[in-house]
Image (cartoon, coloured by chain):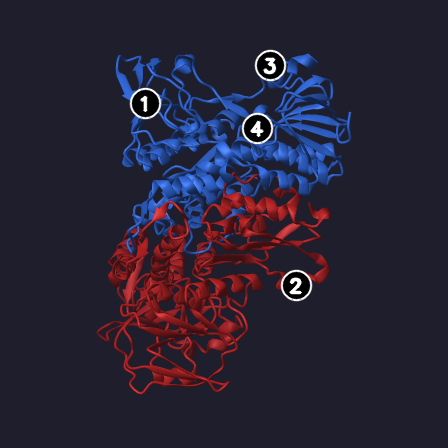
Chain colours: A red, B blue
Amino acid sequence: MGPGDEPDVVVIGGGPTGENAAQYALDGGLSAVLVEGELLGGECSYYACMPSKALLRPVDIVHTAQHLPGAVGARLDPATLLARRDAWVSHYDDHGQERWAAGAGIGVVRGHGQLSAPRTVTVTGPDGEQRTLRAGTAVVIATGSEAVVPAEFEAVEPWTSRDATGVTEVSESLLIVGGGVVAVEAATWLAALGSQVTLLVRGQRLLAGLEPFAGELVAAGLREAGVRVEFGAHIAAAARPRAEATGLGRVHGGPVSVDLADGRSLTAAEVLVAAGRRPRLAHVGLEAVGLDAAAVAAGRLPDWLHVIGDAGTGAPLTHMGKYEARVLGSRLAGATDVPAPADVPVPQVVFAEPQVAAVGLTEERARERLGAEAVATSEAEFTAAAGAALLRDDARGRAKLVIDRRSGAVVGATFAGPEAGELLHAATIAIVGEVPVSRLRHAVPAYPTASELWLRLLEALPRELR
Amino acid sequence: MGPGDEPDVVVIGGGPTGENAAQYALDGGLSAVLVEGELLGGECSYYACMPSKALLRPVDIVHTAQHLPGAVGARLDPATLLARRDAWVSHYDDHGQERWAAGAGIGVVRGHGQLSAPRTVTVTGPDGEQRTLRAGTAVVIATGSEAVVPAEFEAVEPWTSRDATGVTEVSESLLIVGGGVVAVEAATWLAALGSQVTLLVRGQRLLAGLEPFAGELVAAGLREAGVRVEFGAHIAAAARPRAEATGLGRVHGGPVSVDLADGRSLTAAEVLVAAGRRPRLAHVGLEAVGLDAAAVAAGRLPDWLHVIGDAGTGAPLTHMGKYEARVLGSRLAGATDVPAPADVPVPQVVFAEPQVAAVGLTEERARERLGAEAVATSEAEFTAAAGAALLRDDARGRAKLVIDRRSGAVVGATFAGPEAGELLHAATIAIVGEVPVSRLRHAVPAYPTASELWLRLLEALPRELR
């Protein structure tokens, strides 16, 4: 082995999760190497969060301007919008990330990494040459997730999330299969770019894990933007006479037809499958150390092996992967002062119209977990605070707190409305800090900000909790 | 006395502070009457926060759009912008507020109210008729504040804040005297409306009570918007050969010339004096009960009399007045469960470009209060979080936490950057909840939101606090 081939920590996967694990290990005095076979920076930086938000922000601002008297003339220009996306993904060039890693003192090995023995990772480089890394302390698998393509779409060469974020050719019409975050966000920017979008949702609501009003507001917003939203859409078959993988974000051949179980058939120029993701664990060599994906899911791992981020068992969200990575990186480096709360609340922001931001438990989940009698809620219209109503003249939305009656602490919060995303962290801190609502009354929101929704929410609580 | 003339609580002043005091007293089972001689809803609703934010939001969104590739064509249209302002001030008609009060069960007496004896308020109505109200429990003075016009401007008929928010005639050129919130916000919208604005600031910085970087960023933003910012501008004299009070928001006559102490002379079509405000206590009858403004300032009041909001001794901010009113209203109604923290942190948002949001102690104030050795700080560039950088391609700003090393708790926070206003409440809750930074590490901000600045701020803390 050459120098650098025996670091303390080998991280397979150079996305945000892997980068944070390496950085926090390094900050604690360990050496760390990142193994990455694609772009350093990962799915999030090039194919998911970054390009989607680079696309969605101008869409949001233009739509806001169009609903604010005094602002006139705002419209989207698809070509410059796509150019903004290209700039935010650094034109799919990861030299910036490479410089960051070098500056931080993190080793980078390019190639496909897989376990070949305990604590040992074999990297197959772009030219087929192999290199073996032996971890003194730990191997961290942070390979992320990949889109699940149901069998009926396999021959169709559908778009997956990467094509949607990397769109270069806006199809005249588009079917989107799914009703989760990827589906609704992609529908938002692709409709804004000019596609006639139809959302095919298996269930009866969007954003199924969140408070029902969130999905209802987003469905209304999509419909207003010209998107057809079909609930209860069970797909029986899909066909595409001329399917060809023409490249990222380009239309993959001729028209697609989709047959629904109710007998209807739909045709569009392209189909985007956003029907879920799974951990990317098929080619990381688990079998070489006597493991498989089921062992990972069950947490049955040797002490030198850690699977975190989307590849692991936590919430598949970039920020939760990064959090796991910070905790793990610090812990590998010997930190003992990591007083994690029993249940770290998981925040999520959906950049649809309106934005939806949620953290902790929904009312339904809280009732399951705490018992119905222990749960109190309060709700307010988003426009009940002047500062929220001012954001655009067609503002609408809703906010909700879920409270544990026994402690008086917030256990969940959802905000749906313009720019709701930044309202969330206050709730996350309230949950993590276990601040009772009687104390939150003394946290004064500034007038006139949308944060004054907290006043309405606290006023709407059952009297004994106020 | 007629029916309704002997309520439990008489509130002089029907602004947000008075309304909240009445409402919370009522919620607690008392009866309450509001006395208002101008528009019900107060300064804030018609002449301050509401019209200013109605004007500033489209300015912000248009400027944002102009710095977001993908968004094209956005510009301000002064006529429709002023029409939006008119809509948000309900065309200076308070019937909506009157309906709200009636619906809430709060009595409203129109006219100028002043104390005439203990617990007694005499109201002089619009036609000169008098009515006497006798409070069973308390009289609350919530008459707000008024602009201070320095002697040298008395003969000039300058604009004050009401003319700026109520602008109907945009003067070609405008001098603004002051460097605080009113001055910088008015400069922002009046420059956007087309005035050539010069800010005359006595001191060497803007927003003097806040972290220095806040004023520096706002000064840079104003200059970029074409505003001249002159520091150390001591005004020796002002003159206006033809001064006439032509009505709210109209140019008050001919050009104004201002002589500076350094010998320079400046001339403009209008001058806005934003040199501070004082409690509006001159005509509330304090002398009838043996009191004066000094007694109010010193808190020497009989137990039946309360002076709150801008008229009182607290921070002169609408939300703090409303907070005082909620606490007082509940307390008058017998609530005992009001466990107010020793020091309720005061938040403030300045809707300039960039927005500035601050709560609690600045580093300087914390060092004075806690001793220099007890204070730790951390700072981050606003664009250090991807979610913040995404907001506009010219985003810039800064964020700072001030920590009490002994408890590890946040005691102050400042955010300056695009849409920074909504980032503040998280800090306010952290301060009120006394959540130590070691715990805040487990409050995960969603990616990619601007709230991820918290990660950068926590990472920038001294190692022993992390």
Where residue A233 appears, as percent x and y from the top left, is 49, 79
Dot 3, crowdedness within 10 Å: few (<14), some or many (≥20)?
A: few
Which corner quadrant of the image does residue A115 belong to?
Answer: bottom left
The label nearer to you, 1 versus 2, is: 1
The label nearer to you, 4 versus 3, is: 4
Q: Please tell me the numbered disc located at residue A33.
A: none
Residue at mark 4 shares a chain with residue at mark 3:
yes
Where residue A450 appears, as percent x and y from the top left, is 51, 46
Q: Name the residue under label 4.
A: B38
Residue at mark 3 shares a chain with residue at mark 2:
no
Report the Cα–Cα distance between label 4 and label 3. 25 Å
The numbered mark 3 sits on a residue in which chain?
B
Q: Do the residues labelled 2 and 4 touch (CB within 8 Å)?
A: no
Report the Cα–Cα distance between label 1 and label 3. 32 Å
Q: What element carries label 3?
A: helix
Residue B238 versus residue A289 in the image, above or below: above
Q: Is mark 2 on a helix, strand or loop?
A: helix
Identify which residue, B238 or A54, lies in the foreground. B238
Q: Are marks 1 and 2 in contact (CB under 8 Å)?
A: no
- Mark 1 / mark 4, whichever is N-terminal: 4
Q: Name the residue under label 3.
A: B294
Where residue B92 appears, as percent x and y from the top left, is 51, 35
